[in-house]
Image: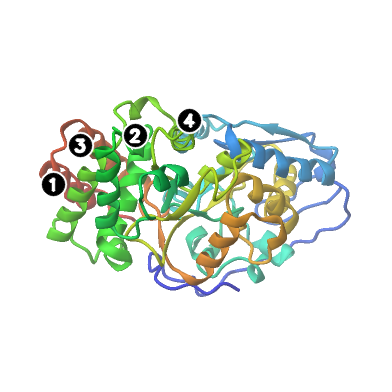
Amino acid sequence: MYRRKGLRLFAVVAAFALIAAACGGGGGETTTTGGEGTGTTAAAASEVEVFSWWTGGGEAAGLEAMIKVFNEKYPNIKFVNSAVAGGAGTNARAVLASRLQANDPPDSWQGHAGWELIGTYVAADQIEPLNFLYDQEGWLDVMPDTLIPLISKDGNIYSVPVNIHRANVLWMNPTVLSDNGISVPTTLDEFFTALDTLKANGMDAPLAMGEQWTSMHLLETIMLASLGADGWNSLWDGTGDWSSAEVTKALENFAKVLDYTNSDASALSWQDAGQLVLDGSAAFNIMGDWQEGFFRELGKTPKTDYDWAPVPGTPGTFQFLSDSFVLAKGAPHRDAAIAWLTVAGSREGQDAFNPVKGSIPARNDGDRSLYGEYLLSAMDDWASNTVVGSLTHGVVANDSWKSEIDTALGLFLSNKDVAAFQDALVAAAAASPNQ
């Protein structure tokens, strides 16, 4: 079982009301019970609709790898891939919200562990508890201690995590750094020096950035670098002060970093920003480790075509997020959905998915021989670093709070007014605390 330190975002759930589920058979003919009502056999359910935002790069390829495992185990169930592209899930979640409001849920959908899950779908009573499935599959023995509280409420577990991603990763072009005599920066001061050197040597935008959600991702990593793990955590647990001088300095650092980014950022995807690094048009990109899945899908070689390090100022801290899947209340094909969740939580499913996706398995028993150099380093850091949660990817703030921050960020990207941005963040924290 993994051991973690530093993530004090949720109190550990004291006990789980595990409900036994009678299951038998195989080859796609499992009869499932548990939760609300008793379903028909999975084989009798003709299809399962799974909703996500994985439509390109290593994300889509990873999902296809897990679908292949599902099809082998359940050949009588048609997998309906209802993925929606764009915006780190922003577009998909808008479509999903409309469907849920219309009482037209997919059977299962992607949701980030943390306040996105608990503060949205659990709060609205839109998903079923999965205690019976955890009991059936023995998942409490293989899922991280850190993760279970983030997907639980009042003793019930509400999703199946499929991975762990790291948010605070600096991606680099090693040739560009070598040609400019730059060592890998480990502090913010070293980062600014490297960026200044590149600009002086004729690179207009040494830090590649994409559309607005990627700027929020950049914001949270620079704030973490500026405030440290304890300072970052304090902003979300109510003990920190958004009006403090430390937050002011963090926002000033963010404003300074933006001066080194490309002017066409709003028109680019995260993949486009990563491509700028591969091409040598930029030296750096700050993005989660799904970027590595994209690089690998392009056939690029680690440590040659690209390199990585923790975001300067954050070595020893692992800023994480976790993708998971839920079971809809009133799922049209409930037993087929449970079959999907069983694959999503299995070692076989996660070891098919994660090496391609560019993430590490949520389970602690993944086959390390299947994972590349970067992902092995991420596994080791996840097991030893101080762990903190991501804002952009649903861990530390509920949707209303995140939305207020996003609105304030949009204005800041236009006017670069640090004082006004900080005032807006103070107001957002007062108006939309985690509930």
CA gap between label 3 and label 1 equals 11 Å
Identify the colour scheme used. rainbow
Residue at the disc numbered 4: 86
Distance CA(mark 2)–CA(mark 3): 11 Å
Residue at the disc numbered 3: 412
Give the image location of residue 241, x and y in percent: 18, 61
In three-dimensional space, the C-alpha distance between marks 4 and 2, rounded to whole angstroms, equals 12 Å
Q: Quadrant of the C terminus?
A: bottom left
Residue pointed to by mark 1? 423
125 or 319, nearer to the observer: 319
Q: Nearer the viewer, residue 389 or 384?
A: 384
Neighbourhood count class around disc 1 (C-alpha, 10 Å): few under 14, some 14–19, many 20 upward: few
Residue 388 x/y as whole percent: 40, 62
Amino acid type of the residue that numbered disc 3 sits on in the rendered structure: Phe
What number is the disc on residue 302?
none
Q: Is residue 51 visible?
A: no
Q: Dot 3: few (<14), some (14–19), or many (≥20) neighbours within 10 Å? A: some
Give the mark nearer the N terminus: 1 vs 4.
Answer: 4
Q: Dot 4: what SS?
A: loop
Instruction: From the top left corner, tell me how far across and down residue 373 is, in percent.
Output: 60, 56
Answer above or below: position of 399 versus 212: below
Please provide percent x and percent y for residue 192: 25, 50
Residue 71 visible: yes
Numbered disc 3: secondary structure = helix
Res 212 label: 2
- Please give left or right for residue 284 compared with residue 48 in the image: left
Q: Quadrant of the N terminus?
A: bottom right
Tell me which amino acid carries mark 2: Gln
Quarter of the figure with residue 79: top right
- Disc nearer the start of the sequence (4/2): 4
The nearer-to-camera label among 2 and 1 is 2
Residue at figure coordinates x 26%, y 65% from the top left: 231
